[in-house]
Amino acid sequence: MKFTCTKSNFNEGISIALKAVPGKTTMPILECVVIEAKGDCITFTTNDMQLGIETKIPAEIQEEGIILVKAKMISEIVRRLPDDDVNFEVDDTNNVLLFCGKSKFNIPGIGHEEFPMLPQIELEKKITIPQFTLKEMIRQTIFSISDNESNKILTGELFEINGNEFKVASLDLIRVSIRKIQLEESYDHIKVVIPGKTLNEVSKILKDDMDDEVVISFSKNHVLFEFDETIVISRLIEGNFYNIEQMLKNNYETKVKVNKQEFFGCIDRATLLIRESEKKPVIMNIHDNEIKMEMNTKTGSMDEEVTAVKEGKDLTIALNPKYLIDVLKVIDDEEVSLYLFNSNAPCFIKNEKESYIYLILPVNMN
C-alpha cells in the first residue's frame, strides 16, 4: 500500500473520522481507523458501534491496500508534520511509514479483518435539505436534551416529517425546544429519535452553505447522513418520544415583546452574582411597558429594567437564567415574545409562525 496526499486533505479526513472514535472503550480495536487506498482516493472509516463514519479524500495512489492504525496517534503525527505532501507506505509486516519533508515516522499497523466495518442497511425513506438548515436546526435545539442516561429517550432528538413539515424537538422535562421548517418536497410520515451525540458530531462536519445538501435516510434501526464525501451512520434510540404537542398550550394571560439583545444582556449580568453551587432564579416583574429583573444571592443583588411591549395582565415569574440564556443565544430575531399564563405555568418563547417554540418551567419563588 502506497499513496501521496496533501497534509491538509489528510488532516481534514482524519479529523472527521475521529468523531466516531470512542474516548474510553473495552474494545481497543475501536480506537483505530481503517485507511484504504483505492482508485484515486483514500477512505477513512471509524466505528464505535453506535456511530460510524466513512469519509474520502483525494490522493495519488501508487499501490492500493488497506490498513488499521491507532486513530488519535496518526492524527497527532500528521497534524504536527511540516506543511508538505504526506507519503504513506505499508510494508509486508504491516508497518506504516510516513514521510513528509525531512520527517519520517515508522508506526505499527494492524490487519483490518477484525474491525467492525459500517453495516449495510436497507434504507426505507429519505429526505434532502440544505446542510446549513440542518446545522441550524440542531444548534437551536440540541442544548435541551438530557444527559441522564437512565432515561435514554431524552438523550436524543425527535425528527418528525409530516408531508412537507420537518420538526426537530428535544426536552429534558424542565424545558422543551422545537424547531420547524417547510421542506421543498412532501414526504411520507417519518418519526424517529436520533442520539444527541450523533447530531452534535454531524453538526460539526456540516457546511454553512445553503447550496450544499445533505441526504438523510432512515431504516427501522438506523439513520444515515450523506454529504460531500462523508457518510455518517447511527443507531436510532428505541422507544416512544414524549407527546410534546399536549404541552403546548395556546392560551395565555400575558404576552410581552422585548429587544433580544437588551434582554440577554440583563440576564447575563445577573448571572455574575451566581456561584457555581447556587441555583438562583432571575425574578421577572412584568408591568406596564417594562420588565423589572431582580437577582438576589449570597454574593449580592441587582435589579434592572428592560423596556417591553406588554399585552394582558401584570405578572411576576421566576426562571432559571441559564435556560433563558440558552434560548436567547440561538434565536436570530431582533425581538422575542414571551407568552405567560401565571407564575406557576410554563413560559413560552416563540415567534408568530411558530417556526421555533421554547418552553421553560418556572422556579417556585417560595
Image (cartoon, grey):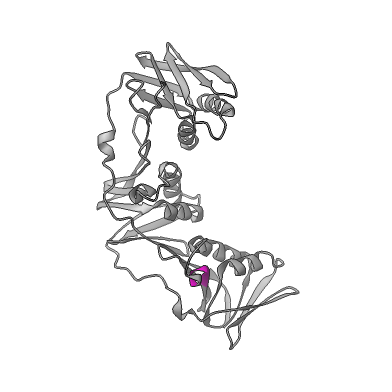
Q: Residue furthest top?
A: 288
Rendered-image quadrant of the C terminus: top left
What x and y, as percent, mark residue 112? 48, 79
Out of 187 and 306, give the one closest to the viewer. Answer: 306
**Quarter-of-image position of residue 224:** bottom left
* Span colored in magenta: 29-33
In the image, taking residue 40 as reference, residue 191 lies left or right, namely left
What x and y, as percent, mark residue 119? 37, 70
- Residue at x 47%, y 55% (from the top left corner): 201
Q: Is residue 135 above or below residue 319?
A: below
Out of 43 and 317, give the one closest to the viewer. Answer: 317
- Residue at x 38%, y 13% (from the top left corner): 314
Q: Is residue 93 above or below residue 16?
A: below
Name the main secondary structure of what is drawn in magenta: helix
Out of 334 and 156, give the one closest to the viewer. Answer: 156
What x and y, as percent, mark residue 9? 59, 66
Q: Is residue 134 above or below residue 121?
A: above
Rendered-image quadrant of the N terminus: bottom right
Out of 158 and 82, give the one closest to the viewer. Answer: 158
Q: Residue furthest right?
A: 102
Count of all numbered marks drawn on residues in the image: 0
Q: Is residue 294 above or below residue 168?
A: above
Decide whether residue 182 is among the magenta residues: no
- Residue at x 39%, y 24% (from the top left corner): 364
What x and y, as percent, mark residue 145? 40, 44
